[in-house]
Each structure stands twice: as C-alpha cells, then as structure tokens.
Image (cartoon, rainbow, N blue to C red):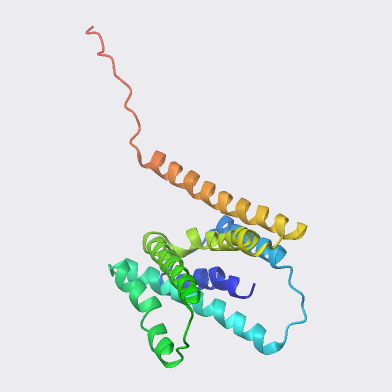
Amino acid sequence: ILNKLSPFFAILFSVFLLKEKPKIPEIIFVLLAFAGAMCVVNPRFDMEVLPALSGFASGACAGFAYTCVRILGVKGERGIMTVFFFSTVISLPLMIAFYQPMTLLQLLWLLLAGAAATGGQFCITAAYRQAPAKEIAVFDYMQVFFAAILGFLFLRQVPKILSFIGYAVIIGAAVGQWAYHMEKARRAQKKAQPAPQTPTQDMPLS
C-alpha cells in the first residue's frame, strides 16, 4: 500500500517540475482511490520500520519516474526509447550478475511476466506522454483490482468483504475522475465555439 503512494508523488513532482496545478476535485479523487486501496490491502499497523520505509521510498521513486516520463514526452522523446531505458538498462546488468538456472516452465512464466510488464510499460509511458499526471494518476489504482481478479483465477485467493468495498471505491474514483475531465473538456470546447450570429432585418426606408 505504501507503493501505491506513487500517484501522490507523481502529482507532487509534476507541480514542481512541470508547474501543473491539480484542481480540488482531482485531489479528492486520488485520495478516494488511495482509501479504496487501503480497504483492499486491509493493512495491519504493526510493520517494522525498514520495510515501511522501503515501501515509502518505492512509491516516491515510482512517482518521480512517472513525472520524468511526462517530461520526456513533453520534450518529444520517443516512447520506445523511454521504455528501453526505463526497463532494460538497469535490470539487464543485475540479471547477468545474479543469473540463476531455470526450468523450461519457469522460463515460460518469466517470459509471460516480461511480456505483460513490457506491454504495461508501453501503455503507461504513452499515457504520461499524452496527459498530465494529475489527470491519470488515479487510474494507477486499477492494478489493485486486476491483481485481485488474476489472484482468484490463478491462485484461488478470495478477497474479503472490505476488499470488495475497496474495489468499488477505486472504480468509482476512476469513473468520477474520467467524468470530471470529460465534462471539463466539453465546457472548454463549448466556450471556445463562436456565438451564433442572429440574422438582422433591413430597416424600412422612411
């Protein structure tokens, strides 16, 4: 759940680095999504200090990384190059240094995980290239929902009632955020349209 702080950090860093100012409704939707994630995880407040700090640092680093992706998109950097450096440059040396032999089945699962992670990375890179962090950060919480579905299908993990409440809150916050920006865009488009001119009648000659 501490890693889920990344959208907060993404919004925070975008304020300082990109001068983006989130509106009050946007902040509320992100807070609602975070509350929903809290319900899903149902955390116990007996964590040791170091794991808690690691999770907090993970959320901060992820939020800063997403903001950097947004900056690269604004500057016109190609998405494929961003994904390459984001996912490969750092992980490849570590994989070589700590390589362990695998069975064929393990290799298959690893390749599937890599394919899914790469697809997700391309999608999140495209999202942050095209839109400010304040508009799409709330949708990051949807991965909690998808993780629950996959956990049930593959691991037979049944969520608790509180978790279902969290899913509803997360989906509601995501839909609310989307509806808010759609309405905002519609009003801006309507305001930009020129006012229709009323036909004038010729005045009769006296």
**Tally of numbered tags:** 0
From the viewer's perspective, is residue 191 above or below residue 56? above
Q: Quadrant of residue 36?
A: bottom right
**Residue at the outermost left position:** 205
**Residue at the outermost bottom position:** 97
From the viewer's perspective, is residue 24 above or below residue 59? above
In terms of depth relative to the viewer, which is nearer, 196 or 7?
7
Where residue 181 appears, x then y in whole percent? 49, 50
One can see residue 98 in this view: yes
Residue pictured at 70% horizontal, 68% vertical = 41
Where residue 169 appears, x then y in whole percent? 66, 55
One can see residue 28 in this view: no
Quadrant of the frame with the C terminus: top left
Q: Quadrant of residue 18?
A: bottom left
Q: Quadrant of residue 74?
A: bottom left
Residue pictured at 35% horizontal, 38% vertical = 193
Quadrant of the frame with the N terminus: bottom right
- Is residue 30 rendered to the left or right of residue 166? left
Residue pictured at 55% horizontal, 60% vertical = 138
From the viewer's perspective, is residue 176 above or below residue 109? above
From the viewer's perspective, is residue 68 above or below residue 150? below
**Residue at the outermost front position:** 104
Where residue 141 appears, x then y in whole percent? 58, 62
Where residue 72 appears, x then y in whole percent? 33, 71
